[in-house]
């Protein structure tokens, strides 16, 4: 059975290493959000650096998730001191559990504050796609799908919760969101 891959990407207003209160607050809430999401029904796993070094993204060992990559529009630093981004790559059983995890609870509260921490962008900040059972998506997969979504809109190859597709490529929707369709997941 296919699984849903979800890649998120945002450019922070200040580097991860910045000791300012907002950066510390983002980190603190982020750890709580990850813990809650990992307990959510339908969650299968997420990319985590093997060494667990806070703020180390480029050059970290991500195991099967591949080498860390960012979209072409990211133009800030790439060292521990200058990196100003937040990215996640996760795997889910289906659309509904991933949607519920993102848009409820502590993560929803964090989303409500996203502009305190993140720059406003004209690019999408997340993308979904289906992978075969047993496949681990890579950071590069996420980046290429996000860039494809930005350039071409939602298609079975790269889509959003609001404009989603079933694993067979047919348009679908999650009950209560997105354009109307005959199918409801």
Image: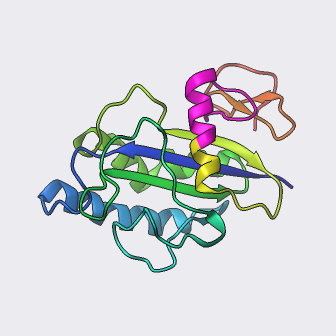
* Relative to 82, residue 151 above or below: above
Give the position of the C terminus as an image quadrant.
top right
Residue at image location 83% in from the left, 32% down from the top: 169
Q: Where 131 sits versus 19, above or below? A: above
- 110 shown above or below 121: below
- Residue 14 in picture, x, y percent from top left: 21, 49
* Residue at the bottom extreme, as displayed: 51
Q: Between 4 and 184, which is closer to the camera in this rendering?
A: 4
Looking at the rendering, the stretch of residues picked out in magenta corresponds to 144-162
Q: Does the segment drawn in magenta span residue 16?
A: no
Left or right: 98 with respect to 80? right
Identity of the residue drawn at 67% across and 33% down? 175
Q: Which residue does the image show at 39% across and 41% down from the upper left?
A: 74
Tell me where residue 163 appears, x and y as whole percent: 65, 27
**Image position, residue 133 (x, y; %):** 83, 60
- Viewed as shown, does residue 136 lie left or right of 15? right
Residue 76 lies in quadrant:
top left
Tell me what residue is drawn at x 33 percent, y 41 percent.
Answer: 112
């Amino acid at each position: 059975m296919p699984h849903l891959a979800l890649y998120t990407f945002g450019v922070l207003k200040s580097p991860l290493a910045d000791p300012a209160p907002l950066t510390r607050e983002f980190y603190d809430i982020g750890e709580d959000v990850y813990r809650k999401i990992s307990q959510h029904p339908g969650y299968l796993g997420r990319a985590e650096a093997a060494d667990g070094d806070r703020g180390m993204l480029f050059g970290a060992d991500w195991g099967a998730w591949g080498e860390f990559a960012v979209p072409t529009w990211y133009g800030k630093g790439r060292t521990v001191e200058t990196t100003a981004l937040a990215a996640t790559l996760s795997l889910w059983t289906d659309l509904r559990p991933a949607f519920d995890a993102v848009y409820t609870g502590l993560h929803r509260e964090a989303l409500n504050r996203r502009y305190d921490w993140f720059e406003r962008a004209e690019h999408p900040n997340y993308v979904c796609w289906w992978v075969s059972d047993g496949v681990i998506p890579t950071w590069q997969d996420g980046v290429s799908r996000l860039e494809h979504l930005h350039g071409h809109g939602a298609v079975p190859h790269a889509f959003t919760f609001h404009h989603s597709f079933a694993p067979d490529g047919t348009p679908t929707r999650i009950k209560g969101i997105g354009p109307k369709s005959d199918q409801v997941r």
